[in-house]
Image: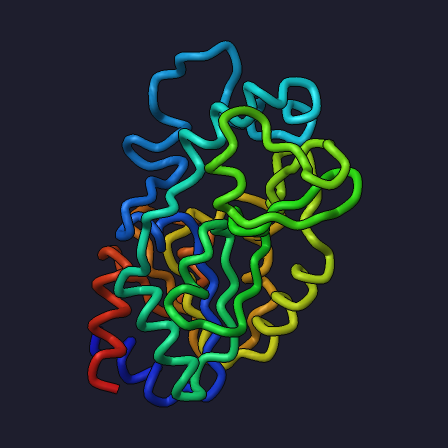
Amino acid sequence: MNQLKEWISEAKRIVFFGGAGVSTGSGIPDFRGTGGLYTEEQTCDATPEEILSGGYLKKYPQKFYDYYKNNMLYPNAHPNGAHLALAKLERMGKLTAVITQNIDGLHQMAGSKNVIELHGSVLRNYCISCGQTYPLSYITASEDVPHCEKCGHTVRPDVVLYGEGLDGFAFKDAANEIANADLLIVGGTSLTVYPAAGLVRYFQGDHFVIINKSETPYDTYADLIIREPIEDVLGDAVKEI
């Protein structure tokens, strides 16, 4: 912790790259951890990856939304210590970007401004035909499949579903931010989901830190590894700065 605090104090361009583990402290379960979508006993005839795909949404919109609303939406979640610490570092002018694989919008709720969402956000939704946009409340209030009030077509979440490609502009922005960072902090991610995980290869700065409860394929490249809950680690590390 002392080493992390020292590097944060010295850094001028910090970039944070995070995944599902950043939001578990806010009550949002991750996919691969204990109790996650990928480890719980399946009660339907399709896997989470199959249901949360663009093809499944088109073919079975009702089944998609039944699963999506019950498993992917947490409208009452609030930012935890990790989100708040990162927002503080940005206000101080030390952190230049938060790059997230999460779709919950908690970084923005905590006050972070430059957030690069690799997989989109559940807070944004749009009509697949006319492009009319809708807030999360429109999705949660819909009893069945949400339909556009203007043209009647299906409204879908502005998130990258399985089988769909990442936003090329977001990926490029993330790569540029990491390439120009002097301190890269990766947290709450297994670094196994590509192409997002490959972003860490763009780092050429001074110190690479991983804060994650389990091992990652990039541990051997890290200058520092901390196996504690990220909300506690970042909250403590930034508290006295």
Residue found at x 34% / y 23%: 40
- Which percent across, then down, holds residue 43? 40, 12
Quarter of the rendering containing residue 55: top right
Furthest residue to the front?
149
> Toward the viewer: 120 or 101?
120
Against 152, is 230 above or below? below
**Quadrant of the drawing holding the C terminus:** bottom left
User: Relative to 117, is 8 above or below?
Assistant: below
Judged left or right of residue 27, residue 208 is: right
Spot occupied by residue 66 in the image (x, y as percentages of width and height): 49, 23
Where does residue 79 sit, x and y in percent of width and height?
Answer: 32, 60
User: Residue 178 falls in which quadrant of the image?
Assistant: bottom right
Instruction: Report if residue 119 is visible in the image.
Output: no
**In screen coordinates, is 225 left or right of 43?**
left
Q: Residue furthest top?
A: 45
Identity of the residue drawn at 54% across and 73% down: 114
Of the pair 126 and 30, the residue shown nearer to us: 126
Instruction: Determine whether, in the image, residue 110 is placed left or right of residue 158.
Output: left
Residue 74 or 14: which is nearer the viewer? 74
Residue at figure coordinates x 33%, y 37% from the top left:
33
**In this orientation, does residue 29 appear?**
yes
Q: Residue at x 74, y 38 (%)?
A: 128
Residue 36, picture quadrant:
top left
Q: Position of residue 162 (x, y in %)?
A: 62, 34
